[in-house]
Amino acid sequence: SRWVVESAEALVDAVLAQRGGGRVHVGVLKFKHSRELSEVYTSLHTLQYAFERLAGHTAPMDLLLHGGGHIEDHGGGGLKVFRDAERNSVAMEVRGEGEGRVMFRAWNDDGGLNCECKLMRGPRSDVVEWMRVYYNHQVVYDGHNKPI
């Protein structure tokens, strides 16, 4: 069953009351960033793999994965990566949307969309809710509900 409590202490009290005392082992997840932003960072390689596997496309993530761009944290749950420090040209945007969902968009040097995807991370497998890849401002791949 799911526990809905006001605090960690209340959760421990509720578990101890149900079990009649004894030992309780507690596991926690620690994040350097917000939970959504941590989801973004842990999803990058999965996004890259999904584009390659489903669409045969290499998503342009070099500025984020290998540095060189100007990265801005937007509201604790997303990142915008610019091609230069003056923020003249957006290269990509990645946003954690909670519940394991991550939204990714990348733009070409000319400002046209390169690719975009919404990924749902799951405990057993990940699913691409939708994915589009563009070439010359035309959709060349459009996939929906694809497990990876």
Image: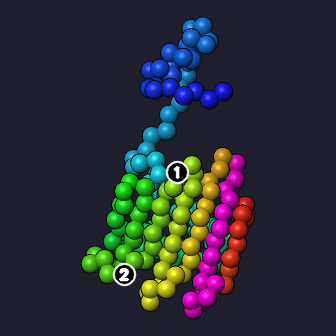
Per the rendered image, the range of residues in magenta is 124-139
> Within 10 Å of the Cα at label 2, are there few (<14), some (14-19), or many (20+) other Cα atoms?
some
Determine which residue is flagged by label 2. Answer: 89
Q: Which mark is residue 118?
A: none
Can the viewer see residue 66 in this picture?
no
The residue that mark 1 highlights is 98
How would you classify the magenta stretch by its main secondary structure? Answer: strand
Q: Residue furthest top?
A: 20
Q: Secondary structure at mark 2?
A: loop
The extreme left residue here reads 86
In the rendered structure, the answer to whether residue 81 lies left or right of residue 134 reads left
Is residue 134 located in the magenta-colored stretch of the structure? yes
Q: Amino acid at mark 1?
A: Gly
- Asked if residue 49 is positioned above or below residue 42 in the image, the reply reads below
Q: Mark 2, mark 1: which one is toward the viewer? A: 1
Q: Position of residue 93 (x, y in %)?
A: 45, 69
Q: Could you say which quadrant of the image residue 66 lies in?
A: bottom left
Counting every numbered tag in the picture gives: 2
83 and 4: which is toward the camera: 4
Q: Compare marks 2 and 1 and give the one earlier in the sequence.
A: 2
Residues 63 and 108: in front is 108
Q: Is residue 57 left or right of residue 93?
A: right
Q: Residue at x 39, y 77 (%)?
A: 90
- Label 1: few (<14), some (14–19) or many (≥20) C-alpha neighbours in 10 Å: few
Query: Which of these two is toward me, 21 or 1?
Result: 1
User: Mark 2 is on which residue type?
Assistant: Ser
